Image (cartoon, helix red, strand yellow):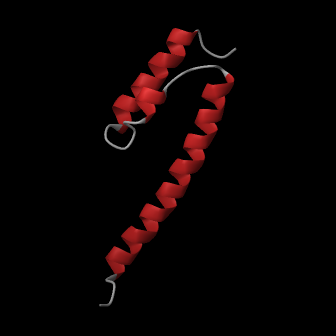
Amino acid sequence: MKIPKYVDKLIDRRAKLAALLAHTDRKLSEWLDKNNIDTQEEALDMYINPWGTADAVKRAIHRSGGER
């Protein structure tokens, strides 16, 4: 079966966004680890509830007192 152009673009976009997500998640995780901020529970939901997860991570940072 020939891949329709729009499906091919969707596949490429998904791959690009997944690579960007992996890179961004690694950088954020490094900062959180460096600052001893535990967000393991929050991180598991990032695919299901991305905005809720972002808010939960921000709350965890605020609770910790911010950057050390």
Q: Image quadrant for the C terminus?
A: top right
The answer to whether 65 appears left or right of 50 in the picture is right
Quarter residue 24 falls in: top right
How many numbered callouts? 0
Tell me what residue is drawn at x 64 percent, y 27 percent. 33
At 41% from the left and 23% from the top, the residue drawn is 56
Q: What is the x, y in percent for residue 64?
A: 56, 11
In the rendered image, the quadrant that contains the N terminus is: bottom left
What residue lies at 54% left-to-right and 53% top-to-bottom?
A: 20
Front residue (pair 4, 47): 47
Q: Quadrant of residue 28?
A: top right
Q: Residue at x 39, y 31 (%)?
A: 53
Image position, residue 5 (x, y; %): 35, 81
Q: Is residue 3 above or below residue 57?
A: below
Residue with the most extreme bottom position: 1
Tell me if 59 is positioned left or right of 66 in this view. Answer: left
Residue 15 % position (x, y): 47, 64
**46 left or right of 23?**
left
| Location of residue 22 with respect to 14 vertically, above or below | above
